[in-house]
Image (tube, grey):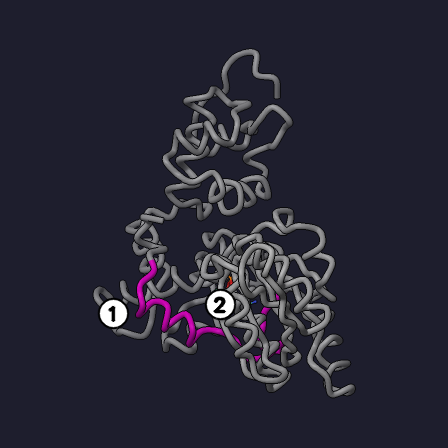
Amino acid sequence: SQDPAVAEDETELAVEGALRPASLAEFVGQQKVRGQLQLLLDAARIQQRPPDHILLSGPPGLGKTTLAMIVAHESQRPLRLSSGPAIQHAGDLAALLSSLVPGEVLFIDEIHRMARSAEEMLYLAMEDFRIDIMVGKGAGATSIPLDLAPFTLVGATTRSGLLPNPLRDRFGFTAHLEYYEPGELEQVISRSAAVLGVDLPRTARAEIARRSRGTPRIANRLLRRVRDYVIVHGKSASSATDAHVAAALELYDVDAIGLDRLDRAVLDAVVRRFRGGPVGLSTLAVTVGEEAETIESVVEPYLVRIGFLGRTPRGRVATPEAYAHLRVPRPDGALR
Ligand code: ADP
């Protein structure tokens, strides 16, 4: 994304790491999922075996990587991080799996983007901790079975619907992470503010929470921008006021309800360019100059969740709330 408020660089990623909760108890919200994971981890500990494979789905920034780290930390197992796009061939996966130490937690982010050939190898590995390595070509090809150390796979995906059923079925536990409520984001912000050493009045925390798109990663980023603002413009480098929050968020183009530039571009295209829709996903993607997958898995879920966008069989449609937010009068004869 080109949005400066959400730009990633290495320092930002390092700070993000420092803000990650290390235990289930510190992990805010997602109460149901937390309870389910706790049971899974407790049972594995009692039986002294690796926890079952876990699939986490949901939009970016809701805590999937953090939960994988917590699973490793709470079960006192080493963690290996990888991602679907890094696994281009079955051989990449074979190398990864055969180098795991017993009981290791393997996190594969964006698991839906792994190569097809690797997916098939993964089925067997997840079920039997075994893979078959093909040697040679054509009529002389043979497969050599290779035993693996038992491991726990934690897969993350923004769209569990994109995973083939045989893969999805091999996870012992599947959880979908939901957007966070403002009150929960306030807790995330309070915790992060303490780590970063900034003081904020409750009203300022609430304002950041309201404008974080239901997403802890965004809440933490906006908080860091507020902290920057205070360091430069504040009377004291460690205490932020409501005015600092308002000024910092204004500077970074975060609107009153937290929509960023891409959210607004999508809404604007549906409302103005396509007169409220319906408009197909690929047309919409071309219009705003973004990948269809990003629109579908990052932008739309939030706009649908806040009731600005509807999905119909004929395409995306804008709701009256979307018109009101953009301050565009609805065309006469609007269907809704
Ligand atoms: P994902 O893998 O889903 O994209 P991450 O696990 O990387 O998301 O989380 C992004 C950031 O948000 C991290 O800095 C993490 O500390 C924070 N975060 C996510 N979920 C929570 C939570 N429930 N409580 C506290 N912080 C969270």
Which residue is at a point 59% across and 38% down the rendered structure image?
307
* Residue 217 visible somewhere in the drawing: yes
Q: Quadrant of the C terminus?
A: top right
In the rendered image, the residue lying farthest to the top is 333
Alpha carbons under labels 1 and 2: distance apart: 36 Å
Residue indicated by mark 2:
82
105 within the magenta span: no
Task: Count up the numbered dots.
Answer: 2
What residue appears at the point 55 percent right and 79 percent down from the top-left corner? 100
Bounds of the magenta span? 8-29
- Residue 179 x/y as whole percent: 58, 54
Under mark 2, the amino acid is: Ser
State the image coordinates of residue 185 (x, y, percent, origin top left). Answer: 53, 62
Instruction: Please name the residue that numbered disc 1 is placed on.
Output: 231
In the image, what residue occupies the spot 31% across and 48% down?
A: 2
Residue at image x 46%, y 33%? 267
Near mark 1 (Cα within 10 A), the count class, few <14, some 14-19 or many ≥20, is: some
